[in-house]
């Protein structure tokens, strides 16, 4: 069975004491992860090391960065390289979140470079894709998302895409409280898997984890994660509340 993942995206939230409090509270909640389930915390850069230390030794729980530079190293003030993330023992990095695409003008081509440099440093990208509202209203979301995948991922050879993690996040559902229906999520996830299968074959496509993101919360996680092509979620707002995120972890497919 492909990996089922509950990924928290804290975005630019919390002080260090608040972050520590959240992790402590979460560890005290009743949650469990089996062999094919993971919880991943994408935390702000300054908290990666302390949160990682707090989670050390926990089975199937990982820390991720929310971004990395497309460049290897050098004069890029304010940037963080994949090599640095690897050197502190990270295994995952978010790439191409819609907020970075929008506010930092990250293009599909630049994201392809980030994917490459992450993989060169044994970091598994959690590659985010998803359409804005006007594309959904025009009904062209399938080809829009397909282009995002093609331009940023399809240069990868089969062995690198194998076991990959994609997060589908319709922009109109992020932080808006307006979740895609479980039917809309399933439809797009199935489309993404078909697109991956066309390029890489059924076996590889079946092994790729596709997360849904956009206003996932305890109250809707079970229904969304219950869809056959939805393999968990990338969770913003609700990941900042320990009991909510614990319930989301417990909603992963068994
Ligand atoms: P949200 O954010 O859960 O607050 O909608 C999801 C995300 O942006 O990853």
Image (spheres, rainbow, N blue to C red):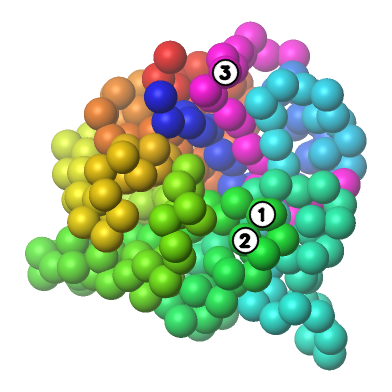
Q: Which residues are magenta?
A: 28-49
Question: Ligand 1 within 8 A of label 1's CB?
Answer: no
Task: Give the image quarter of residue 253.
Answer: top left
Q: Quote the CA–CA distance across marks 1 and 3.
A: 20 Å
Q: Which residue is located at x 31 percent, y 40 percent?
A: 203
Residue 123's disc number: 1
Disc 3 is placed on an element classified as loop
Mark 1: which secondary structure? loop
Q: Does residue 11 show up magenta in the picture?
A: no
Of mark 1 and mark 3, the one earlier in the sequence is 3
Q: Specify the quadrant that holds the C terminus.
A: top left
Q: Residue at x 81, y 80 (%)?
A: 73
Q: Is residue 38 magenta?
A: yes
Label 3 within 8 A of ligand 1 by Cβ: no
The reply, left or right, for residue 64 in relation to residue 225 is right
Up-down: is 46 above or below 61?
below
Q: Quadrant of the N terminus?
A: top left
Per the model, the C-alpha gap separating discs 3 and 2 is 23 Å
Instruction: Say if residue 17 shows up in the picture.
Output: no
Residue 28 percent location from the top left of the image:
74, 14
- Earlier residue among tags 3 and 2: 3
Name the residue furthest left: 139
Q: Position of residue 10 (x, y in %)?
A: 64, 48
Q: Say if 39 sits above or below 96 in the image.
A: above
Asked if 183 appears above or below 254 in the picture, the reply is below
User: Where's residue 14, x and y in %?
Assistant: 75, 48
Residue 161's spot in the image, x, y percent?
A: 45, 54
Disc 1, disc 2: CB below 8 Å?
yes
Q: Label 3 belongs to which residue?
A: 35
Along the horizontal axis of the image, is 55 left or right of 128?
A: right
Residue indicated by mark 2: 119
Residue 165 vs residue 222: left or right? Answer: right
């Amino acid at each position: 069975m492909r990996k089922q993942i509950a990924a928290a995206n804290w975005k630019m939230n919390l002080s260090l004491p608040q972050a520590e409090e959240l992790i402590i509270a979460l560890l005290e909640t009743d949650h469990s992860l089996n062999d094919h389930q993971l919880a991943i915390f994408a935390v702000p850069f300054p908290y990666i090391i302390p949160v990682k230390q707090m989670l050390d030794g926990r089975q199937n729980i990982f820390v991720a960065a929310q971004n990395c530079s497309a460049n290897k190293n050098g004069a890029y003030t304010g940037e963080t390289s994949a090599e640095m993330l690897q050197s502190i023992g990270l295994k995952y990095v978010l790439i191409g979140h819609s907020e970075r695409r929008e506010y930092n003008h990250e293009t599909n081509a630049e994201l392809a470079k980030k994917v490459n440099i992450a993989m060169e440093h044994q970091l598994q990208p959690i590659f985010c894709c998803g359409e804005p509202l006007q594309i959904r209203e025009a009904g062209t979301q399938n080809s829009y998302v397909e282009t995002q995948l093609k331009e940023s991922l399809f240069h990868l050879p089969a062995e690198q895409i194998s076991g990959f993690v994609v997060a589908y996040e319709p922009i109109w559902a992020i932080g808006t409280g307006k979740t895609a229906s479980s039917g809309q999520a399933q439809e797009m996830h199935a489309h993404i898997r078909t697109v991956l299968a066309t390029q890489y074959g059924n076996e590889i496509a079946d092994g790729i984890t596709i997360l849904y993101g956009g206003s996932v919360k305890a109250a809707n996680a079970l229904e969304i994660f219950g869809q056959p092509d939805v393999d968990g979620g990338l969770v913003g707002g609700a990941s900042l509340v320990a009991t909510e995120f614990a319930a989301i972890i417990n909603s992963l497919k068994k």
